[in-house]
Image: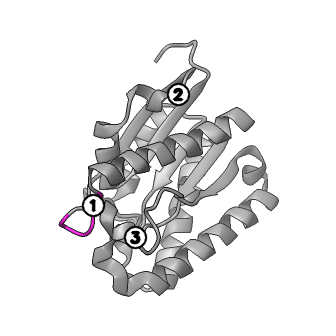
Amino acid sequence: MSSSNRHRIVVFGHSYVRRAQAAAPSNLGLHDCSVAFISRGGGSVVFSRDTHCLYNYLPQVEDFRPNVIFVHAGEVDLHLPRHRLLTALEQFFDTIIGHCQPAIFIISQLLLFPELEQLREKVTWINLRLQQYVHRRNVGNNVARRTRLVFWRHRCGLWGPNSHRLFSSDRTHVNATGMHRYVCSIRTAVGQQIHSA
């Protein structure tokens, strides 16, 4: 990483992040930035020794010394009761922030895959509680004052009545058009925050 790059950005999460890395331009097309994608397909936010546990990848995140982290995770764990999943997500985010202490921490909304349409109310509930978590952390403790949290809602068609058109035949991952929009949404989320910092 060039020492001239002002922002060190990590995009961290499950298979969406892995696929985004393959589709994204170098450094998300952002100037004065160095971007690392760190991911695990099927990555879970529940702490365990399983290789799919995203906690196992925290050393890679920390080693990059990011001042901005964008995290997309949680859909893999939607089989859990809602309160248990919310607790797992909050503990996961608290752990990342505690270890890495980024200036900016962006939490992606959970997406509603067509395959999980029956969980719409649950996904909506989780997203609302994550917004409340972000608010609490931003007005609360000392770590939150060092780290500005942002809840990112993708406004690129990935949520809404016609979102199924952006998903592939597996009804879980996005198609090429959906991935282009997803990558652009991440770029917008990160770009807005670093330019307002």
Q: Amino acid type of disc 1?
A: His
Which residue position holds label 2? 30
Q: Nearer the viewer, residue 5 or 58?
A: 5
Q: Main secondary structure of the magenta part?
A: loop
Position above or below: 83 against 32: below
Q: At which x and y percent is residue 137? A: 72, 61
The structure residue drawn at horizontal position 58% and vertical position 51%, both measured from the top left corner, is 106
Q: Are marks 2 and 3 in contact (CB under 8 Å)?
A: no
Q: At which x and y percent is residue 11? A: 45, 43
SS for callout 3: loop
Q: At which x and y percent is residue 166? A: 33, 61
Q: Is residue 129 visible?
A: yes
Residue 173: mark in rendering: 1
Question: Which image quarter is the C terminus in?
Answer: top right
Q: Nearer the viewer, residue 114 or 2?
A: 114
The structure residue drawn at horizontal position 40% and vertical position 70%, both measured from the top left corner, is 162
Position above or below: 54 against 18: below
Indicate which disc, 2 or 3, sits on the residue closer to the N terminus: 2
Span colored in magenta: 169-174
Residue 101: mark in rendering: none
Which residue position holds label 3? 162
On screen, residue 63 versus residue 95, left or right, reads: left
Q: Amino acid type of disc 2?
A: Leu
Q: Is residue 79 visible?
A: no
Disc 3 crowd, CA 10 A, few/some/many (<14, 14-19, 20+): few
Disc 2 crowd, CA 10 A, few/some/many (<14, 14-19, 20+): some
